[in-house]
Amino acid sequence: MSTTQNDYLCSFCSKPQAQVKRLIAGP
């Protein structure tokens, strides 16, 4: 489920992609 959300988020916000990945990866 995480992969789908990440893919969709990156697609809709390819700019803040790093931020999204950081959130998923954690602090």
Image (cartoon, rainbow, N blue to C red):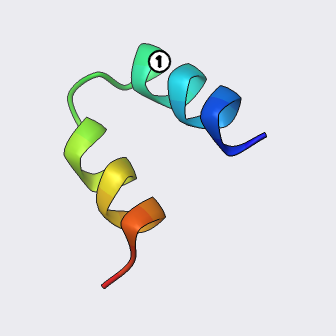
Q: Secondary structure at mark 1?
A: helix
Query: In the displayed structure, does residue 15 sit left or right of residue 5?
Result: left
Which residue sits furthest bottom? Answer: 27
Location of residue 8 with respect to 23 vertically, above or below: above
Place of residue 13 in the rendered image (x, y in percent of width and height, measured from the top left): 37, 26
Q: Residues within 10 Å of mark 1 (few under 14, many from 20)?
A: few
Q: Residue at x 38, y 50 (%)?
A: 20
Given residues 13 and 21, the one toward you in this image is 21
Name of the residue lying farthest toward the top: 11
- In percent of width and height, residue 7 lies at 53, 23
Q: Which residue is mark 1?
A: 12
- 9 with respect to 19 (left or right): right
Quadrant of the rendering where the C terminus is positioned: bottom left
Amino acid on which the number 1 mark rests in the picture: Phe
Frontmost residue, 26 versus 17: 26
Task: Find the residue positioned furthest to the right.
Answer: 1
Q: Looking at this view, is 15 or 5 the one in front?
A: 5
Task: Indicate whether 27 appears above or below 22.
Answer: below
Q: Residue at x 20, y 28 (%)?
A: 15
Residue at left offset 27%, top offset 54%: 19
Q: How many marks?
A: 1
- 13 relative position to 18: left or right: right
Quadrant in the picture for the N terminus: top right
Residue 14, picture quadrant: top left
Q: Is residue 2 above or below residue 12?
A: below
